[in-house]
Amino acid sequence: MIEYYSDQVYLDAEYIAATAADSFDADYGFGAAPWDAVALGILAEKNKELAFTADKADKLKVDQANYIAGPSLKILAKYLDQAAKDGYIPYKATLGQYISADDAAARYKALKAWYDAKKHFWVGNGPFYLDSVDTTAKIVVLKRFAQFPDPADKWAGFVEPKIAKVELTAPTVLKIGAGAMIPVNITYKGEPYPSDEINFVKYLIFDANGNLVLKGEAKYMASSTWQVVLTPEQTKKLVAGSTKIEVVVSSKVVAIPSYKSATFVAAP
């Protein structure tokens, strides 16, 4: 049982718990790591040959564990052989309930094959893996992990903001006291903007004196078309003269709204 205190405060209690839990993740400090790779560092630190933190490395006068290059690799390789031979499971009283001896043997065998092929112990679970390291030339080579579950274009939609293009066709003359329908066309790169990705389409109408007299939401019709529907009772609020309608489109996928305005003449 671990009792943990933190001064990080969020409005949502779940974030506080998640932050505390993250403190005990098995990782290299820069991404997820498999327990078998971490186990090698545990053995090396336990025997005072390496240390996970710079502070402890200074205290013990040993190298900080380096899973990528340097003299740490030979030490980690030594403990890989030892862990495989002994069937070592860290914190066995607990993890032994979830990791069998066969599981441990398979993991160490796979890690040994990885080390023999890549010459390092940096094993992750992301879309790329560290294929090779050249510390002299300061070059690392990353390669795509083909079995990563997310498709390569998963985040492609965020490369360019999906800002809606709005076209507004207002009548030249609108008779006061008569109903009207003003079409609004909403697209992105020439294609209809998906209606399920639109938060709202609102309109504002300012009369000839500059007063806001009408406002509401346009109705979705089909494809890229929305309609601002004005009833006779609403248009009676207009005064004769130049009138402006402004449409605001809010998307669910980008934070930037789109605007379009047009003018028409309100006539008695």
Image: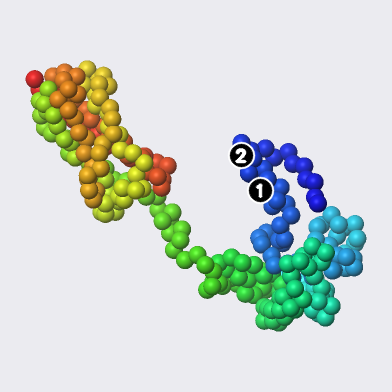
Residue at the image point whose x is 66% and y is 62% from the top? 32
Who is closer to the viewer here, 215 or 141?
A: 215
Q: Tell me the CA gap for discs 2 and 1.
A: 10 Å
- Number of marks: 2
Residue at the image point whose x is 40% and y is 45% from the top? 252
In the image, taking residue 261 as reference, residue 69 lies left or right, namely right
Mark 1: give few (<14), some (14-19) or many (20+) Cα within 10 Å.
few
Where residue 213 appears, as percent x and y from the top left, is: 25, 21
Where residue 171 appears, as percent x and y from the top left, is: 13, 34
Residue at the image point whose x is 24% and y is 34% from the top? 261
Mark 2: give few (<14), some (14-19) or many (20+) Cα within 10 Å.
few
Who is closer to the viewer here, 191 or 12?
A: 12
Where residue 231 appears, as percent x and y from the top left, is: 17, 28
Kind of residue at disc 1: Ala
Label placed on residue 12:
2
Residue 268 visible, this angle: yes
Q: Is residue 153 above or below residue 172?
A: below
Label placed on residue 154:
none
The residue sitting at the front extreme is 97
Q: Is disc 2 placed on a helix, strand or loop?
A: loop
- Residue 97 figure quarter: bottom right
Q: Is residue 6 above or below residue 103?
A: above
Label 2 vs 1, first from the N-terminus: 2
In which quadrant will I find the C terminus?
top left
In the image, taking residue 189 as reference, residue 238 lies left or right, namely left
Residue 71 visible, this angle: no
Where residue 165 appears, as percent x and y from the top left, is: 29, 45
**Circle 1 sits on which residue?**
18
Who is closer to the viewer here, 15 or 128?
A: 15
In the image, taking residue 171 as reference, residue 137 lies left or right, namely right
- Residue 120 figure quarter: bottom right
Kind of residue at disc 2: Asp
